[in-house]
Amino acid sequence: MKLCMIGTGYVGLVSGVCFADLGNEVVCVDNNISKINLLKKGKIPIYEPGLSELVAKNFKNKRLNFSSDLKKSVRESDIIFICVGTPTKKGGSSADLSQIYNVSKEISSSINKFKIIITKSTVPVTTGDEIEKILSKKNNKKKFSVASNPEFLREGEAIRDFTYPDRVVIGTNDKKTGKILKNLYSPLISKGASYLQTSRRAAELIKYASNAFLATKITFINEIANLCEKIDINVEDISIGMGLDKRIGGRFLRAGPAYGGSCFPKDTKAIISTADKFKTNLSVIKSVIKSNENRSKILLDRVYQILNKKIRKKKITFLGVTFKANTDDMRDSSSLKMIPWLSKKGAIINYFDPTGLKKEFSKLKNVTHQTTIKSAIEGSDLVIIHTEWNDFKSINFKNLVKGKKFIIFDMRNIYSSSKIEDQGFRYYSVGK
């Protein structure tokens, strides 16, 4: 099939490349000409393991192309995926849908035969209805069908998540559209993915409800971790004991920093905004948002206590600053709250992250990027393991930096306390 992916951000690029790898003819479109030119040269604008190899393979085989000409790309395609950003509105909590609607207007003037237009971006309920209204102003409804096909890609695991998904969700009441899209996804369905066809509005809500529930699991176990610290219980025992119940499951029951990234923060806010619009109180999700926003303060209070309430001129190292491992995404990472706060209190901060220098810290006083783990932790009073990169999971601190007995605060519970304490270091973790 001939597919057009509008938007070469995380969702559009990964989905487009993976569709091409399944044998489809795909064009990825973006109005950023410099980005398109870089993609044609094989230079990838995001960090995602395995993506550059797939881009090179499918571009060489001419199943994948890149363009800044949206109208031409739409005219030459059968299925158009809208994959542009839906960030939180500035000063508000609802999703900013301006890119969605602007793209819909451009698509409207390029429909030359029957097209299926799909929202793959995460959008609030009734967005598909609005897209349909926009397209109907210039086109007969028989010439297009608007569907919802939410994505469930985890950053750092996106290619695997696309290739071996738990489920494929298609939101449409049109039988023709449903048949075409089920055929498009048949290579994945044949490998075991569940296929669910629902109404368009239901598909839109499935995405938000899923992310809100996962955010709730993270926030729940973080609050349980707070209790565990007060009563000398290991939160990991609690996570395992709960996770063995198949109704609950163990995934996302790992205590640590606040959730961040491109999805959970904005999607929890957006579903609350949608509920308010329809005069419904989602009190549980409101509590999740409030608790998560307070999480970094709790961890900073712990740092304050670990350092005996003396932060000024203390040398603090952050190992990892992205919101999670295997991504360069800094959006809503707890390090964005923690590092500026510590800097303002007079701490001297080094940080190392496998994805390199972060512009977010460039203007902060006494904050320095280091290019190796060794240089980052040398001379430190406190080392904070902030992100669970594999690079940090087997460090021999004693051999790496000899003679300096710094404190280690493991916010990801990567290590056992006995292993680190046997090396002569004071060790703190979360929920223990």
Image: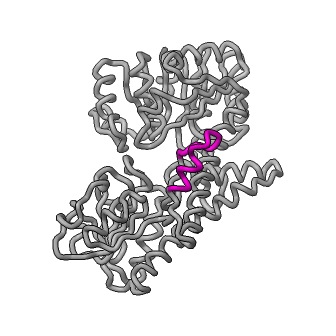
Residue sitting at the far right: 279
- Please name the residue shown 63% across and 25% down the image: 170
In front of the other: 79 or 287: 287
Q: Residue 231 lies in magenta, yes or no?
A: no
Q: Answer with the quarter of the image where residue 33 lies.
A: top left
**Left or right position of 265 against 281:** left
In the image, residue 361 sits, relative to residue 216, either above or below, namely: below
Residue 3 in percent (x, y) is at 49, 21
In front of the other: 306 or 352: 306
Residue 76 in percent (x, y) is at 49, 17
Asked if residue 362 shows in the view, the reply is: no
Asked if residue 380 shows in the view, the reply is: yes
- Please name the residue shown 42% across and 73% down the image: 340
Colouring mode (rainbow / by chain / secondary structure / one colour): one colour
- Please name the residue shown 29% across and 38% down the image: 43
Q: Residue 238 lies in magenta, yes or no?
A: yes
In the image, residue 421 sits, relative to residue 388, either above or below, namely: below
Number of numbered discs on residues: 0
Q: Answer with the quarter of the image where residue 14 lies.
A: top left
Residue 100 in percent (x, y) is at 60, 39
- Please name the residue shown 72% across and 33% down the image: 202
In the image, residue 321 sits, relative to residue 34, either above or below, namely: below
Residue 199 in percent (x, y) is at 73, 27
In front of the other: 168 or 429: 429
**Left or right position of 428 against 232:** left
Task: Look at the image and give the residue range highlighted in magenta.
Answer: 237-251
